[in-house]
Amino acid sequence: MTPQAPVGKSLVVAVRDKLKEQISSGRFRSGDRLPSEAALTDEFGVSRTVVREAIASLRENGLVMSRRGSGVFVIEPESAAILPFESADPEKLSSMIELLELRTAIEVEAAGLAALRHSPHHEELLLTKLKELEELADAGQPAHEADFAVHMAIAEASGNKRFSEALSMFGVLMIPRHALEPAAVPVAAEYVELLKHEHRDIVHAVLDGDEDRARTAMRRHLKGSQARYKKLRRG
């Protein structure tokens, strides 16, 4: 029987943690090559995208390294870096609320600056990413990566690369819905419309050059995310 990810945990986190356990238990030692993406997909019963994200997380943690044309190899645990936010657990309500509060402090300012500093290139990027998010949401497809891409585009439009660097450290797991088992929490039509409306408000405020409106829209969105995540986690 194919192992399944624990209910209530994101698939990426579940696969990442299982691979960490296999490394710490000695199944894979320093210098060993991890199984191929196809093999890990079969082992854990997940998509290749999930496997890639899980391995990327291990790589960021300094547990593995990729060798072009050869695969992914385990490296010495002593060289593993302790990164910011590594202790954040999407399964815990407190961790996600902490991240959302921190994101609010960062992204409200980024949205305001983006309204003042965005270029024609950023305008095109924002509209493209917003359209991709709306199309995926309308099709009922997972939209967490597209959601993250919109926020990254806003951070980039701020003209301060530190904002996008900060969001990159969070990664796609900063999107609350991605922290939940997709099959366990159906996406309601009302949520889809709200998701589109909130992101559209932010992007349009930025494109209109309205600093105050951009800040307000971003704050409303992230505060709403906190409330919605609490509701989802409490059932």
Image (cartoon, rainbow, N blue to C red):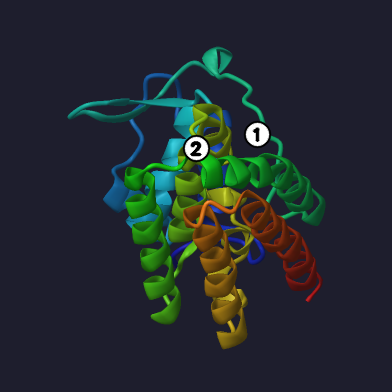
Residue 165 seen: yes
Q: Residue furthest left?
A: 69
Look at the image and tell me in which quarter the N terminus lies. bottom left
Secondary structure at badge 2 equals helix
Q: Residue at x 57, y 60 (%)?
A: 202
Question: Quadrant of residue 18 in the image?
Answer: top right
Residue 18 seen: no
User: How many C-alpha atoms fall within 10 Å of the one at disc 1: few (<14), some, or many (≥20)?
Assistant: few
Q: Position of residue 198 (x, y in %)?
A: 60, 68
Look at the image and tell me in which quarter the C terminus lies. bottom right
Of residues 179 and 43, the one nearer the viewer is 179
Q: Position of residue 166 (x, y in %)?
A: 58, 33
Q: Amino acid at mark 1?
A: Glu
Of residues 168 and 130, the one nearer the viewer is 130
Q: Position of residue 82 (x, y in %)?
A: 63, 22
Decide which of tag 2 and tag 1 comes sooner along the chain: 2
Q: Position of residue 91 (x, y in %)?
A: 71, 55
User: How many C-alpha atoms fall within 10 Å of the one at disc 2: few (<14), some, or many (≥20)?
Assistant: some
Pointer 1 residue: 86
Q: Amino acid at mark 2?
A: Ser
Q: CA distance from mark 2 to mark 1?
A: 10 Å
Question: Quadrant of residue 190 in the image?
Answer: bottom right
Q: Which mark is residue 205?
A: none
173, above or below 34, in the image: below
Pointer 2 residue: 57
Secondary structure at badge 1 equals loop
Of residues 81 and 106, the one nearer the viewer is 106
